[in-house]
Amino acid sequence: MVCYFPRPSACFLAGSDPFPGIPGEIILNSKVNNMNRKDDLIAVFDSGVGGISVLRHLVKLLPAERFLYFGDSANAPYGTRSREEVEKLTFAAVESLLPRGLKALVVACNTATSAAIDSLRSAYPDLIIVGIEPALKLAADHFPGGRIGVMATPMTLAEEKFSHLLSRYHRDSEIYKLPAPGLVELVEAGAGNSPQAEALLRKLLAPYVGKLDAVVLGCTHYPFAAKALSRVLGPEVALLDGGEGTARETCRRLEQADLLRQGAGEIIIENSSRDPALKALSLTLLNS
């Protein structure tokens, strides 16, 4: 069952401060219910529609669960914002979701994970919080000594969290950072596999065509541009993302806490944008 509600009450408009008070201060008003129940929601958060690529894996692995997906398309893309902006927007979204009754939070956004996951876990120690990282380990394991591109937003590639991840694998593989400005916006417009996306990717990836064994999709929007990527790089280049691993980790944490649910599942999709076209796009991506 899929429901969609636009939720204008959760709309944090670009340029506004979702946190009143001291500039830059994160104000935590909501409390996590320590008595989590199996019927409580699993919230899945992303900067826009990209996290639906993770939601697909979650629904496939955990069909009996109740999912609440929230995309902050009003403020997308996060990848060109500062770390502080991304952290504030992430906390604003999470604060709006907590009163709904959550047993887990999946941060299905690589940029938000890089900027805010540690702070979220410190702020809500009683909540299961799972983030997503570029699937670099998967790529290194499958292509030892190979040539691996990591395609991600500028902020993700610049973060210390990614530098630590990179340091674990760069000795055994040739790893190239592949920023892709503009691709998130095309996916948000439902044009991830369009001629425009292909033209953008040909321009960005021209120096690497014929030189890569695999590309790690380090942004949850990018799986929705996979066809365009394969047309540019060739079908022999493996495209790897962290969505399946994130779903497995979520399942493991819920099972460990004895919070797995039985029965019919439910999916609620909400967005901070008032654009009605996002309803159809979200459902199309979920079922693609």
Image (cartoon, grey):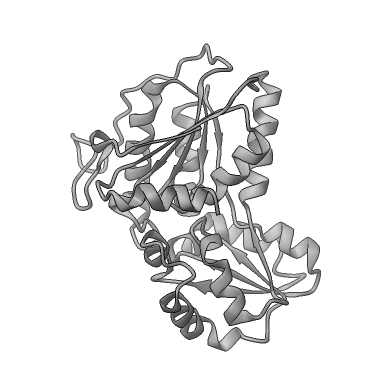
Could you tell me residue 237's position as x and y percent?
69, 75
Could you tell me residue 271's position as x and y percent?
34, 43
Above or below, 137 against 151 in this view is above
Residue 168 quadrant: bottom right
Q: Is residue 222 visible?
A: yes
Q: Residue furthest top?
A: 35
Above or below, 173 against 33 in this view is below
Could you tell me residue 164's position as x and y percent?
61, 57
Q: Is residue 55 left or right of residue 262?
A: left
Could you tell me residue 109's position as x and y percent?
48, 50
Q: Is residue 177 visible?
A: no
Q: Is residue 18 left or right of residue 99?
A: left
Above or below, 203 against 99 in this view is below
How many numbered marks appear? 0
Above or below, 242 against 6 in this view is below
Q: Residue at x 33, y 30 (%)?
A: 96
Identify the image quadrant of the C terminus: bottom right
Residue 155 quadrant: bottom left
Q: Residue at x 48, y 31 (%)?
A: 122
Q: Give 137 or 83, whichever is nearer the viewer.
A: 137
Q: Give 169 or 9, whichever is nearer the viewer.
A: 9
Q: Give 188 or 280, whichever is nearer the viewer.
A: 280
Q: Give 71 or 253, whichever is nearer the viewer.
A: 71
Q: Residue at x 81, y 69 (%)?
A: 144
Q: Residue at x 57, y 70 (%)?
A: 227
